[in-house]
Amino acid sequence: MSPLPAKQGEGQGGGVVRVSRLHSFIQRVQAQLVCLDEAARLIEDVPGIVLELGLGNGRTYDHLREILPGRRIYVFDREIASHPDSHPDADHAILGDFRETIPRAARRFPGKVALIHGDIGSGNKEATLALARTLAPMLPPLLAPGALVVSDQKLEVPGTTPVTLPGGLQEGRYYMVRNG
Ligand SMILES: C[S@@+](CC[C@H](N)C(=O)[O-])C[C@H]1O[C@@H](n2cnc3c(N)ncnc32)[C@H](O)[C@@H]1O
């Protein structure tokens, strides 16, 4: 495998290098894996449920199930389009637009969430940034003390502080914040 560049878009000496979409994908999923594993460790002493925002194919949901076997995990998306091995059961699938389902979840699970994983990016960068700006202020009522928000987008969640990324990941590769 050709080596991954240190950071997408930057070569040695600060020059710009083209990073293939394959490299970019691998960097993203490596960062997801490392951050989710670290999050599972960091919430060991934080009781509560887990929310997966963005079921998609169900890869990260499947991983969360594996690393957090004792936790109730609720998944959010417009529809269930995951791999059949990663379908959530009906009681744990919350379908609809995040902008409607998350405020409803905040009324249903106030202060009960130990971990939110947001994997909300789409091919439309502007729409993704706008969604992140809209969702971030909706999250605090859900969070238990010490809860984590891990996400593919920067979420300015009021009342949280940034967590240093694990595994030597560069800032901005993924995002982790802790409530409080
Ligand atoms: C990057 S994919 C998630 C990938 C998934 N975590 C995986 O590992 O397979 C993002 C998902 O977010 C969902 N999504 C994006 N914007 C949404 C919105 N406003 N409301 C509900 N779902 C949304 C999309 O339907 C898509 O399935």
Image (tube, grey):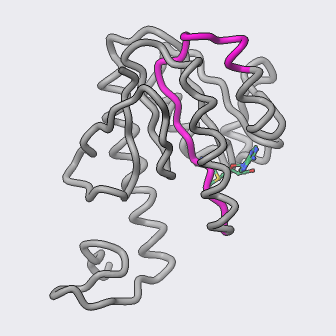
Count the marks.
Answer: 0
Q: Quadrant of the C terminus?
A: top left
Query: Hey, which quadrant is residue 97 in on the image?
Result: top right
**Magenta highlight range:** 105-123
Q: Nearer the viewer, residue 61 or 174?
A: 174
Q: Nearer the viewer, residue 15 or 80?
A: 15
> Going by the image, does 145 lie left or right of 61?
left
Placement of 134 over or under 105, stated as above or below: below
Q: Quadrant of the N terminus?
A: bottom left
> Going by the image, does 141 lie left or right of 26?
right
Residue drawn at (21%, 85%) of the image: 14
Give x and y (percent) for residue 154: 47, 50
Residue drawn at (63%, 30%) of the image: 138
Give x and y (percent) for residue 99: 76, 38
> Going by the image, does 48 lie left or right of 34?
right
Query: Hey, which quadrant is residue 45 in on the image?
Result: top left
Residue drawn at (38%, 35%) of the image: 177
Q: Is residue 27 magenta?
A: no
Placement of 9 over or under 139, stated as above or below: below
Q: Is residue 122 magenta?
A: yes
Placement of 80 over or under 92, stated as above or below: below
Give x and y (percent) for residue 116: 52, 30
- Residue furthest out toward the left: 13
Give x and y (percent) for residue 89: 76, 24
Residue drawn at (50%, 32%) of the image: 64
Q: Nearer the viewer, residue 19 or 131?
A: 131
Query: Hey, which quadrant is residue 179 in on the image?
Result: top left
